[in-house]
Image (cartoon, coloured by chain):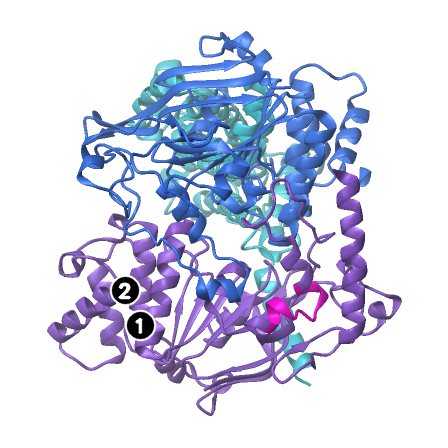
Amino acid sequence: MTEPLLEVRDLHMHFPMKQGVLQRKTNDVKAVNGVSFTLNKGETLGIVGESGCGKSTLARTLVSLLKPTSGDILFEGESILNYNSKELHALRRNIQMVYQDPYTSLNPRMKAGDIIAAPLKAYNLTTNLKKRVLELMDLVGLKADDYNKLPHQFSGGQRQRIGIARALALNPKLLILDEPVSALDVSVQAQVINLLEDLQEELGLTYLFIAHDLSVIRHISDKVGVMYLGKMMEMSDSESLYKDARHPYTNALLSAIPLPHPGKEKKRERIVLEGELPSPANPPSGCVFHTRCPFATEFCKGNVPAFDLDEKNSSGHYVSCFYPIENK
Amino acid sequence: MLEINNLKAYIDTPDGIVKAVDGVSFSIKAGETIGIVGESGSGKSVLAHSLMQLNPKPPVFYPQGEILFEGKNLLQLKEKELRKIRGNEIAMVYQDPMSSLNPVLKIGDQLMEAILTHNPMTKSEARQRAIELLTDVGIPDPKKRLNAYPHQFSGGMRQRVLIAIALACNPKVLIADEPTTALDVTIQAQILELMKRIQEKYGTAIIIISHDLGVIAQMAEKVLVMYSGRIVEKGNVEEIFYQTAMPYTWSLLRSLPRIDSEAHERLLSIEGQPPNLMNPPSGCNFHPRCPFATEQCKLVDPELTERSADHAAACILSEAEFEEAKKRIETKDQERGQGHD
Amino acid sequence: MLSRKRNLIPFVFLILLFVATITAEWWLPVSPSVMDSGLRLMAPSSENWFGTDHFGRDLFGQTIVAARVSLLVGFTVALLSTVLGTITGLLAGYYKRLDSIIMRIIDGMLAFPSLLLALALVAALGGSVTNIIIALTFSFWPVITRVVRSSVLQVKTIQYVEAAKTSGVKDPVILARYILPNILSPIIVQGTFIFARSILAEAALSFLGVGVEPSIPTWGNMLQESQIYITLAPWFSIFPGIFIVMTVLALNLLGDGLRDAFDPYAKGKKKARKRLFKQKKQYAS
């Protein structure tokens, strides 16, 4: 069970920034700036971060839509970066993606059934095509008579189910979920999260679940990684992260989420972060978080903290901070 | 101060009439914060825009109801009189800080325009006031920032500027329509803090609209829960969260993902989709998704009835019946949860 | 779309003109090619509705028959330039590498005023219906390429295109099934306008004497021949002129109507307003 399916090693994805009439390259936007992790078969890794932290860029490099600047991505022990187009085509069967926006991720001129059938057709799996599509629709909780409907005839939650069915059509091993529920209503969010959990159990899927806040991730992840400005700040199994968050940024994220408890809310002490996210084109020196960190010292400005195993937690709790927070 | 009586706002679409707001009543006092919660399509935004008569008409029209602001019915005022109240007495902060500012005008000019529209003062006085306002909303180095353009600001900063514009004339009521939905959580925390501080300083009444029950719990004193154009429960924030009396509110609270849950704890979802307002279900609008629904619910459309002094809910179940039904469902869930693991 | 009067009238006009011109031989009372030296430059009468020309031929018949060339040229040019423009536009918009090559060529072609370009081409190739079609296609095709390219650039960034790519869908399928159907509306609208513009251009070329051979009746040729008689027999110029104007106007109106029909926001606005008025009363009572 603990066989690694996906390994990411010191991944960098920089975009050149061009300016002026001559389009001269001035700087690099360091969207992903040295990220490493291992994802085991059957597990769910949650990646959390605010907008601009590079989590979506990370997802796009994993499905080979972008070619990373440096680093390595290993799928089932094999580096995928130098694949030719034929090998890439074969790889895509195994890594599929579900998108955030259920409105723009489905072709408005295609019927639901055809949308789900598209990946099957692309791989010439056309025997029993209709039967397979109906099977998939049933799997994600769509009715058979939804087959001929157009996307605009569905609600947001149902559209997201179509997107999930499309991603499952090729029996992938890894599913990259890029904020799959953040565009949905609360009451529908829960349905989709439960569906994803059931599917994982039934089909033995591995998930990489990207989200912008920690509360949704809580319900689905085995491991959680927190990203800030292209770097991983903290990563551990979910239990240890929520009970004993060590990085000041993780703590700030946790305390920023308003709880649906008016009683607790009024008494709660929170770490309100000052200031705004710095530009990824000019990340701060030293620890990238030092400009907003309430505990930063002079030392943090000049030195980059390593992404180290925390001595206190034996269970693989990594943190990138000189002064991790001691929780009782 | 602001009183809404049986307000109805319908939208005329090519496919039929949408009853976006269908008979809503509430009132707000100075210095109070009311939270309006609801999912998309519950009519909360149309309601907010109705209060300032900002809905485009057509297609929106108001077949019934009144909006009383200091004794005047805003629904009957002329456009000219409305303009005096808009921005001056009642101001609004929008969801999208990106598109709510004019990209080709300097922040300072937009702010000063808002000040000068309603206050007779010289330009340099207005400038002074603009700097004051920017300081109030926590923008560093406000003098220099007056000359900046919106694109030089981040989302959180723009929302601060929008709040500054809304505050330009010391409004008595501030309507905030999903003010933090487009922002990151850490920035959301900043903006919510700011709104609380502003309220303490100026005694503004705030109507905050959100789909996020957490935001409401943090900000509001009174809460209105909206479902398909109606208020289905209203009361003090504690009553809504701890003595929930309406199945929809109760289910919504249970379906929230929360950080204080156990790992892999199963979310309790509400079945089905929000209703189509063009052709709402018979009886109680929530009955097709309600775990407690009986045959009776398909026939009877429940009125908002009082449960205690300030607490009212629209459900035919009495308090005792509801308690019993809740227990039944909770034990069933527990059994299923154990079976699941 | 045709349920609206504004769109129905031009549509019916074009259909009638089309049917009239291809069946002209069967129903015209006076054959347009019969010369009668006794009837030269006669004013409109019950016999010759539009009068006669300097050879005594019936002008009504000529005007109707002349529509053949105009409609043929207009339609063929619209179709060819739309097809070519769509292909080049799709390629330029989708493949970054092809973009700079195709668009520089297109920019070069667009640098000439389209009529001038057609004029030069016809002058070099010689005047015939085929050559006019080739020349006009060359001058209008870049317009479509530009429109298609910019639409592709927009649609290509929408997530369903990316989703198709990650599901392993191949580029030709993406272009045909995911991008093309979503940009059809601007293409059709532009195609209609090009139809109208090529009718005008053909008339202009013939008028300048570099168009279709003078023996074939076209509106442009008729205008050219009538020039010297304009004070003597104004009807000779007026009727072909009116037909050019009406046909072009009809096509432009149709194009506008199509644009509105494809724009979901504009749809039904007026109807809604009317209904609103009724319902307001009903709900108020």
Q: Is residue B261 left or right of residue C110?
A: right
First-in-chain label (2 vs 1): 2
Q: Is residue A255 left or right of residue C108?
A: right
- Give the residue number, with chain letter if any, for mark 1: B167
Residue C86 at x, y percent in the picture: 50, 26
Q: Residue B328 or B218: which is nearer the viewer?
A: B328
Question: What color was chain B assigned in the picture?
Answer: purple
- Give the residue number, with chain letter if any, for mark 2: B137
Name the kind of residue labelled 2 in the image.
Val
Residue B301, can we see it?
no
Residue B172, can we see it?
yes
Magenta-colored span: B239-249
Label 2 Cα crowd, 10 Å radius (few <14 / some 14-19 / many 20+): many
Residue B67 at x, y percent in the picture: 52, 83
Residue under the point 23% across and 32% down: A286
Q: Secondary structure at mark 2?
A: loop
Numbered disc 2: what chain?
A: B
Q: Residue C250 or A171: which is nearer the viewer?
A: A171
Q: Is residue C210 left or right of residue A274?
A: right
Q: Kindly give the residue lying farthest to the right in the view shown.
A: B295
Question: What color was chain A assigned in the picture?
Answer: blue
Does the CB distance between marks 2 and 1 fall below 8 Å? yes
Q: Main secondary structure of the magenta part?
A: helix
Name the kind of residue labelled 1 in the image.
Leu
User: In the image, which is nearer the foreground, mark 2 or mark 1?
Assistant: 2
Q: Kindly give the residue lying farthest to the bottom in the view shown.
A: B71
Task: Give the letter of the cyan chain.
Answer: C
The answer as to whether the residues below labels 2 and 1 share one chain is yes
Numbered disc 1: what chain?
A: B
> Which image quarter is the C terminus of chain C in?
bottom right
